[in-house]
Image: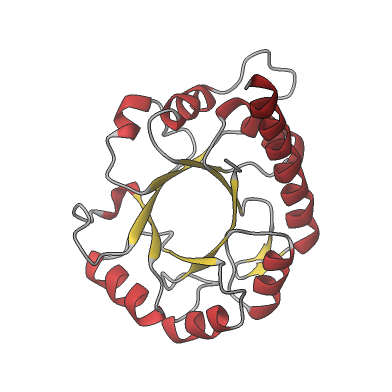
Amino acid sequence: MSVRLKICGVANERDAQEAAHLGADALGIPMDGAPGSVTPEEAVQLALRLPPLLTCVAVFRRTTPARTVRAAAAEARIRVVQIGEDSGMAPASQGDPARIVSIGAGRASDAARLGRIPAAALRLALSPPSAGARELPPDWTCARGAARVCRVVIGGLADPAALAEAIGYVRPYGVDLLEGCEYTPGQLDVDRLEALAVSARTATALLESERVWSR
């Protein structure tokens, strides 16, 4: 199965259309009231101009009350939300939006614990590898282990080569592009996005070819 591509920080129509052109499977729309975020009404207008099979994700980068998350997602007609691990939301109940739970860089240290987090997927921000280091960062190993028991979306990497290496090593459900791709909050650097998206797609194609040859 192909590695999904999510492009985050999409807060205007230009960036939304560029992300769709780059082949994104999902767009992360910031809706937590922080700089660069949009209102539910603006999110609806963005979604109306996108291809019909592109998934929109309401992203809450800072701690937001559960009732606010649910209300904003419902008003924006969005069925997937991304929240922090410390959001305090109770386990999802019927009718709640699907959840991607975001784990910050350096905080992924126990694959078994990650596998027990109630979420449709985990967004793990990976630490970039140190130049000349012989070993990969510990959170890469944790992410690889977690990817065997749950859906893992990797983020946090702004270097195309590091992203490609992480995809090959972790074998994630998806990748999330944001770090290193913002001019300012709410304004994306399309050239940087394109370099990372091409790297992700190339690495995904290599994984697919490995699966074919291993059959």
Q: Residue at x 61, y 54 (%)?
A: 178
Could one spot residue 96 in this view of the protein? yes
The colour mode here is secondary structure
Judging depth in this view, the residue of 92 and 101 nearest the camera is 92
Quarter-wise, where is residue 215 in the image?
A: top right
Q: Residue at x 51, y 68 (%)?
A: 29
Could one spot residue 110 in this view of the protein? no
Q: Residue furthest front?
A: 215
Please state, as top left, top right, bottom left or bottom right, where the N terminus lies in the image.
top right
Q: In the image, is 78 to the left or to the right of 91?
A: right
Quarter-wise, where is residue 148 in the image?
A: top left
Q: Position of residue 6 (x, y in %)?
A: 58, 55
Q: Residue at x 77, y 48 (%)?
A: 198
In the rendered view, would you say 86 is above or below 36? above
Q: Position of residue 107 (x, y in %)?
A: 41, 34
Q: Residue furthest top?
A: 134
Q: Residue at x 54, y 78 (%)?
A: 47
Q: In the image, is 81 to the left or to the right of 200?
A: left
Quarter-wise, where is residue 63 in the image?
A: bottom left
How many numbered circles does the render carry? Answer: 0
Q: Position of residue 144 (x, y in %)?
A: 50, 26
Q: Position of residue 147 (x, y in %)?
A: 46, 32
